[in-house]
Image (cartoon, coloured by chain):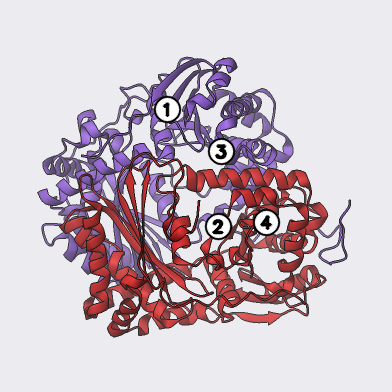
Chain colours: A purple, B red
Amino acid sequence: MSGTEARGGPAAGQRPIPGHPRPYEFPTTHRTQLANGLRLIVTAMPGRGLVTASLVARCGAAEEPDELAGATVLAARGMTEGTVVRDAIALVEAAERLGASLHSEAGWDATSAGVDVPASRLEPALELLSEIVRQPAYPDAEVDRLRDERLTDLLQARADPRRRADQEFVDTIYDPTSPYHRPAGGTQETVIGITAGDLRTIQARDFVPERTALVVAGEVEADAVVGAARRLFDDWAGPGGIVESSLSDASRVTARRVRVIDRPGAAQSEVRIGHPGLPRRHPDFHAVSVMSAILGGLFNSRLNMNLREDKGYTYGAGAGFDLRRHRGPFSARAAVDTDVTVPSIQEILAELDRIRATPVTDAELRAARDYLVGVFPLRFETPGPVVGALAGLFVHELPDDELARYRDAIESVTVDDVQRVAREHIHPERVAIVVVGDHEKFAAQLEAARLGSIEIVRDEPLTGG
Amino acid sequence: MPVPVVEFSDERLANGLRLIVVEDHLAPVVAVNIWYDVGSKHEVPGKTGFAHLFEHVMFQGSAHVGKAEHMALVQAAGGTINGTTWLDRTNYFETMPSHQLELALWLEADRMGTLLDALNQENLDNQRDVVKNEKRWSYDNRPYGSWNEKLLAHMYPADHPYHHPTIGSMDDLDAASLDDVRAFFRTYYVPNNAVLSVVGDCDPRQVRAWVERYFGPIAPNPAIPPLPDLSLPPTIGEERRELVTDRVPLPRVYVGFRAPVFGDRRLDALDLASQMLSGGKGSRLHRRLVREERIAQDVAVFALPFVSGSSQFLGWATARPGVDISRVEAAMIEELERLGAEAPSEDELVRAKALTEADELGALARVEERADRLSMFATLLDDPGMVNSLLQRYLSVTADQIRDAAAEVFRADNRVVLTYVPGDPPAASSIGAGEGAA
């Protein structure tokens, strides 16, 4: 090797071998339930003085009626916009005096209201949480503003190539009867008609005690949290009647197809390739986690090593499954230099074929398993992610020991498992290929590549007002 | 709830490497964090973007590590990893399961000692392409993506290195040769130009032994060239304005001001001012622009701390559809100036401090954040103890100090106003006062 210079540094043959791993267990979690059905899930984490608490309802945007698409997300946001006790400003000021940040949001499967607060002020912060969940006011004026902000956000989403590509992708892969074909926050057509009354109805339906959990982690004592929760929530009675979700997650992609959103002058092409994937609660969860780490999760994943480190087509390429209650999307994604749009698509498709056709190497398998197992304690260093993971178990109705057995389950994934789940859950012959970019610059190459039917959509930005 | 004090050791190896160690066994994780005292401000005209390109090269292998293997080894050990480049510095960091600490130290030492053994034209060309795609992704293909470059160009004179952004010029990157990269490495990537912080589940004596073993043999550079005098007048001296017609969905106004350097107590006051102005729903700007007058979709202001010449205080607001952007600008400026005219109320101050204290409590819980702050304070201020004193500094700021700092900074003759309006961009854009920034 040329260029060696006497400068020092580690000598050859010194590469360290790891020491003995310190035993790690997911922190002990205390679970109980009030008479009204509210679950209490509390994890004591000594030394973590900023506590996270979250009231999580197992009901999200997937369950809302089509004509009210977006109402769940707005209803969640609106919980911090004032209660029957005080208006939005008085509410935020009360929280700030505690050093507490209140937040509320909804996704496809859940709606939540949460707070991060120093441990000594947890109880008054839980009172605020109870207030926004049990007594939200939804003043007309605030609802009008939230609705207008969402409509404006939709304009911005259309202009941003990334968000535009994500939206066009799900719209392409899901059947219009599936809510997953639209953004969780709704579309212009539906959001415009949402009223304060709709939000009250949706919020009252989402937050009923028997479908809600209070999840708390940090420097707390479980008994004290349970005591506070009893005081605040024992008298919370909600309407009975569980909403059973039976939504469609059907694919509309029967053969490989290409959809180009043509943006003359675009500086790059945003590429999304995929189809509906699998639900979170699925026996293949752990094998799929390992497989997608190898395909497009790790920095040294096949997609990133090929498109970035070998060819320099992109700043980063990846792939993964968005795991929801029903089949969320599987997508491979990259933002690539316009000139290499078509070669990039071909390389991605080749990688989707390859992970199905040939077994991964032992080294690849080990690297992915060791990463997922090793990074597990890092993920749960602080209360926020612990609450997130425990809330996830509740939302997806997974067993209490799911996190405790995660690492063993990952360790037991084999080369054959990876190939089997790749064949079962990745279907290169019926992917949608969505590109937001300057079509003219790659049109001829795209035709010649014969990837499937091609649809060109001329970009028409929405205009304000 | 008091924020726990961070107990750390602070020493130097014979070759000048500064080593800071914190022992904390709460979780079985440990953070390794290196700051090199080199950033885009060390670049000279014609070689912009170099510090950042170099950061990419640092992942392309060294004498005993293959291309991209550094990332692979850390991830396969169950760690997380990254590097970032900024105007004043470049940092590299790994968070590891604690039994893998030695691997991270060895990897950092191997590239500090032997990077050039592995450097070749193919890897340099590959990463140049990656960086070009990073620029397209982060700036060019993003609505309003040119704002940072434009703001810097207006705020700092052409002969000051803060005038250009870290990503640099693609023409300059094209001109970069292997010899340039080698010279950059030999000059700046040396132990006496670095701070290494190790925080978490570790035995400090063992850490010292490993660091001595792997980093100890690396030769220092006794002749790191000093930066020229980069001091600047505290204000820009005039209002500078630019109107940008571009493919944006809505009009947006950016404002920027020169502000006191990192470590100056007036910047602490401005950090609390940012909280009062735009930190959440109860803040002044959010309340007025978004909630009450409903002229803006969003608004944000904050300080970006720099050490050479002046920091930046900046912000933006996006107009709601149909609202004249000049109205948004006027309301924003009025609120900034109002803070400079009358001191905030006691209640506002109490709320801002309570939130700041809670933020510190959360941030310092993470080993990665503690390690990064120790390296930062040691590199930029030669005072790692700031990791503990910063909160006390925030808590001691008075309402009058906030007013005074606001009055000094939020002045018309210290202001850049950049306004984006939707439309087709002209073929070649020009920028005020004849300073090309495209």
Which residue: 19% across, 40% down? A202
Label 2 is found on which chain of the structure?
A: A
- Tell me the quarter of the picture where residue A393 sits: top left
Would you place residue B224 above or below residue A67 in this image? below
Query: To which residue does mark 1 refer?
Result: A261
Label 3 is found on which chain of the structure?
A: A
Query: To which residue does mark 3 refer?
Result: A318
Q: Amino acid at mark 1?
A: Ile
Q: Amino acid at mark 4?
A: Phe
Q: Amino acid at mark 3?
A: Gly
Question: Foreground residue, A11 or A235?
Answer: A11
- Same chain letter for marks 1 and 2: yes
Tell me if B200 is positioned left or right of A454 in this view: right
Which one is in front in this view, the residue at disc 2 or the one at disc 4? 4
* Lower position in the chain sequence, tag 3 or tag 2: 3
Q: CA distance from mark 3 to mark 4?
A: 24 Å
* Lower position in the chain sequence, tag 1 or tag 3: 1
Q: CA distance from mark 3 to mark 2?
A: 22 Å
Query: To which residue does mark 2 refer?
Result: A378
Residue B168's spot in the image, x, y percent? 58, 55
